Image (cartoon, rainbow, N blue to C red):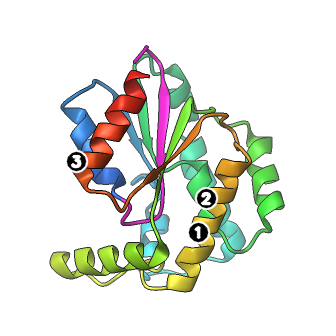
Amino acid sequence: MGDNIKLVFEGQDGCGKDTQIALLKDKIDFTHFKYPTPEFPSIREYLEKKRSIEPKSLFLLFLADIANEQEKLADTLETCIIDRYVFSTIAYDKHFPYGQAKDLVSDINFVRPDTVILLDLPPEVAHERKIKQKKKEGKSPDRYDEDIEYLKHVRERFLTLKEDSFLCPNWVVLDATKSPEELHKEILKLLKE
């Protein structure tokens, strides 16, 4: 991999982004960007059902969080791996029509990634994985984990963003039902190419 490559991992909660990024840490040097950041604690409070936020404000808060690190992202000289980006903001939103959400994001002129890896997972599997994980951690599911219909909306939007090659001509969809080891091999192969 060359310097200054910007690689985004996207997908529903439970698709294995954290696992795959952790596996890459042993293989390549990179700067890790993960959203949402701790800089915007109200987002985490919303996800944990401790606060309510009006949908328009929520969309803009997620974008503000990402916009807050744009200079750092643009100036990083080594490979950047980004865990969630503006694509998640659009995919998880239910307030703005798809085209309008895309237009809002386009107008802000975010740093464009070189590749988006979409770890695709059926909503039922995502739901099951997150419920198990939260139970193990002794936590209750967040706002998005428990609603399978909502997760269907999220998946459809991710796949539509891929079809539109939104903000990135190089989208790769990987089957996140595969074992973490199989997925890791596919990702390494992709990075070598």
Vertical arrangement, residue 156 with respect to residue 113, above or below: below
Q: Residue at x 43, y 14 (%)?
A: 2
Of 123 and 46, which appears nearest the observer? 123
Residue 90 visible in the shown view: no
Report helix, strand or loop for mark 1: helix
Numbered label attached to residue 32: none
Vertical arrangement, residue 30 with respect to residue 162, above or below: above
What range of the chain is rendered magenta? 1-15
Q: Please say if the residues under marks 1 and 2 sit with CB atoms less than 8 Å apart.
A: yes
Which residue matches tag 1? 154
Quadrant location of the C terminus?
Answer: top left
Upstream in sequence: badge 3 or badge 2: 2
Report helix, strand or loop for mark 2: helix
Report helix, strand or loop for mark 3: helix
State yes or no: residue 182 in magenta: no
Which residue matches tag 2? 158
What distance separates the C-alpha of mark 1 from that of mark 2?
A: 6 Å
Q: Residue 68: where, in percent of width, then height?
A: 56, 42
In the rendered structure, the answer to whether residue 76 lies left or right of residue 87 reads left
Q: Nearer the viewer, mark 1 or mark 3?
A: 3
Residue 66 visible in the shown view: yes
Question: Disc 1 residue type?
Answer: Val
Which residue matches tag 3? 181
